[in-house]
Image (cartoon, rainbow, N blue to C red):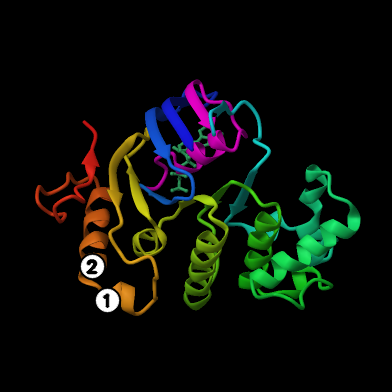
Amino acid sequence: MLQITGLNHSYADGHLALDGLDLTVPDGELLSIVGPSGCGKSTLLRCIAGLIRPTSGTISLNGAPINGVPDDLAVVFQDYSRSLFPWLTVRDNVALPLRRRGMGRAERRAAALKALESVGLPDAGRKYPWQLSGGMQQRVSIARALAYRPSLMLMDEPFGSVDAQTREDLEDLVLRVHRSEKITILLVTHDIDESVYVGDRVVVLNRAPARVHADLPVELPDARDQIETRGLPEFVRMRAEVGRLVRGGARVPGAAPAGTAPTLDK
Ligand SMILES: Nc1ncnc2c1ncn2[C@@H]1O[C@H](COP(=O)(O)OP(=O)(O)OP(=O)(O)O)[C@@H](O)[C@H]1O
C-alpha cells in the first residue's frame, strides 16, 4: 500500500506546489490522477519516485518511508524519445535496469524478450529505438518497466505524444498488464475520458497548490472495451462529473449512484 500524509512541497523559488496532500492507494489499484494544468501532478509523482524530497509530510510504500528512489518502482514518462538510449538496442534498453536486480546477462536478456512479447513487440529486440514508431517506442518503455517487475508503476501522461488510435491501443495494453501482473499503477493524465476508461478510481487535484479535491470510484465492469465501455451511461455520467470537478466545480449532491458517492475535501 502507498500512503501519503500531509505532503507539502515548495520549490527553491518559494513556489508552493503541494499543500497538505493525503492519499492512500491500495495494492493492485490503477489510480488515475487528473487536475488543472500546472496544479502539481508531476511534482506529486516525482516525490513518490524519490526524485525530489518533499518539504514536509510522509510517503510510505508497504510500510517503509520513501527517502530515495524505491527499489521496486518503475516510471514511464511521456517523452519516450528521451527515456530510451538511442545507442542501445531495444532489448538492451529493456534489460538495462535489471542489473539493479542483480540478474545475470542471460537472465536479463530472457526477461527483456518476455516483456517485449507481452507488449506485442516480439521481433523488435535487435532494432534501435529510432527505428520504431512513437507508439512502439512507448511500448518499449512499458516493457522496460514491466521487465523490472515493479510493485508500483508511475505513469506521467504516458500517451500524450502518440496519435489517437495508438493511444487507445496503449490504454488497453496498460489495462491488460495491470490485470495480469497486479501492479499498483498511478497514471497522471490530462485526458478525462482516459482517466475514467482505465481507472479503478479517479482522484481530482485542486488548482495549484495541489490537494485532493475529489476521490471517485469507477463503477464500470473490469473488462473494458473502447467502444462499449465509452457508451455506458455510467461512463458518460462519470466523465461529465470528472470534467466539472477538474474545472473547479463542487460535486452535485446525488450525482453518483447510492454507495458510490465521491468524497470531497473541504
Ligand atoms: N523546478 C521547479 N521550480 C519552481 N517551480 C516549479 C518547478 N517545477 C515545477 N514548478 C511549478 O510547480 C507547479 C506544479 O508543476 P507540475 O509540473 O507538478 O504540474 P502539473 O500538474 O504536472 O502540470 P501539467 O498539467 O502542465 O503537466 C507549476 O506551477 C510549476 O510551474
Q: Is residue 51 magenta?
A: yes
- Give the residue pinned by disc 2: 236
Residue 226 vs 104, above or below: the answer is below
Question: Is there any visible trace of residue 160 in the rendered image?
Answer: no
Give the magenta range. 36-61
**Mark 2 vs 1, N-terminal side:** 1
Extreme-right residue of the structure? 105
Q: Is residue 155 left or right of residue 33?
A: right
Q: Is residue 77 magenta?
A: no
* Depth check, front residue: 65 or 33: 65
Q: Find residue 231 and name its label.
A: 1
**Between marks 2 and 1, how big is the CA–CA gap?**
7 Å
| Quadrant housing the C terminus | top left
* Relative image position of residue 194 (x, y in whole percent): 39, 63
The x and y percentages for residue 65 are: 56, 25
Count of number-bearing discs: 2
Q: Position of residue 223 (x, y in %)?
A: 40, 70
